[in-house]
Image (spheres, rainbow, N blue to C red):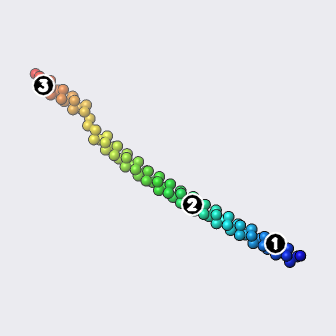
Amino acid sequence: ANASNGEDITRSISESETDRSKQNSSIEDILLSETNQLSALLKQLETLEKLQATNNKINNQRIKLIPDNTNNNISKKKKRKKLQN
């Protein structure tokens, strides 16, 4: 009876170690998956930041390209007045 009891305990320990090993490998798989997802998100964020920087540069160039018509309009009005005289 004692021998079989010892075998039962050994079997029980062995099974619980196998279960723990499966749990650990399952946790490792989950962590790996989460890490891969985080890496993908980080790449997307970096891409978005680059696009935002490019967009800002384009907008800044557009602002520089918009003509400041206030001086042009004043000089045109002066020219018209001179022509009328």
- Counting residues from the start of the chain, the first of labels 1 and 3 encountered is 1
Quadrant where the C terminus sits is top left
Name, please, the residue furthest toward the right.
1
- Counting residues from the start of the chain, the first of labels 3 and 2 encountered is 2
- Residue highlighted by disc 3: 82
Residue ID at (53%, 56%) = 38
Amino acid type at circle 2 is Ser
Horizontal side, residue 68 vs residue 35: left or right: left
Marks 1, 3: nearer the viewer:
1
- Residue highlighted by disc 2: 33
Image quadrant in which you'd find residue 78: top left
Residue ID at (60%, 61%) = 31
Seen from the viewer's position, the closer of residues 83 and 36 is 36
Amino acid type at circle 3 is Lys
Q: Return the x and y of residue 58 as percentages of the image width and height.
A: 34, 46
Residue ID at (82%, 75%) = 7
- Residue highlighted by disc 1: 9
Amino acid type at circle 1 is Ile
Q: Return the x and y of residue 61 as percentages of the image width and height.
A: 31, 44
Residue ID at (22%, 29%) = 73
Instruction: State if disc 2 and disc 3 touch (CB < 8 Å).
Output: no
Tag 1 secondary structure: helix
Q: Return the x and y of residue 57 as percentages of the image width and height.
A: 35, 47
